Amino acid sequence: MTHIIAIRRAQRVAITDLGHECALVNIFDDEGDESDDATTAVAAVCQLPDGRWIAIDLTQFEPVVVH
């Protein structure tokens, strides 16, 4: 099973445990509405490299400063 281990919100990308990058196709705000603001999104949908789709709870990922 593939797991999402990191999210790059600004680039709208999810990174899998195998190192694949998957575009966040849809993102949703806390009211369940589709949004264009990745900084306030709480959920997202992306397609995995094997063609399966996955829903992501973005509240489970903590922000990290990258230098």
Image (cartoon, helix red, strand yellow):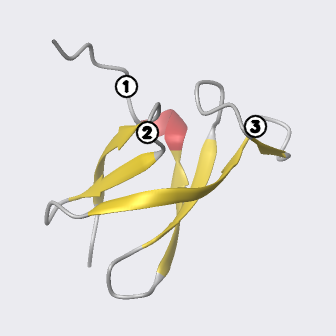
Residue 59, position in %: x, y? 52, 34
Q: Which mark is residue 25?
A: none
Q: Decide which of 14, 4 is in the foreground and name it.
A: 14
* Quadrant housing residue 60: top left
Q: CA distance from mark 2 to mark 1?
A: 16 Å
Q: Decide which of 37, 52 is in the foreground and name it.
A: 37
Residue 31, position in %: x, y? 86, 38
**Is there a contact, CB below 8 Å, between mark 3 and mark 2?**
no
Q: CA distance from mark 3 to mark 1?
A: 17 Å
Residue 23, position in %: x, y? 45, 58
Residue at which label 3 appears: 29
Q: Secondary structure at mark 1?
A: loop
Front tag of 3 and 2: 2
**Is there a contact, CB below 8 Å, between mark 2 and mark 1?**
no
Q: Is residue 50 above or below residue 60?
A: below
Quadrant containing the C terminus is: top left
Q: Is residue 37 above or below residue 66?
A: below
Going from N to C along the chain, the mark reached first, 2 or 1, is 2
* Mark 3 nearby-residue class (10 Å; few <14, some 14–19, many ≥20): some
* Mark 2 nearby-residue class (10 Å; few <14, some 14–19, many ≥20): few
Q: Residue at x 28, y 19 (%)?
A: 64
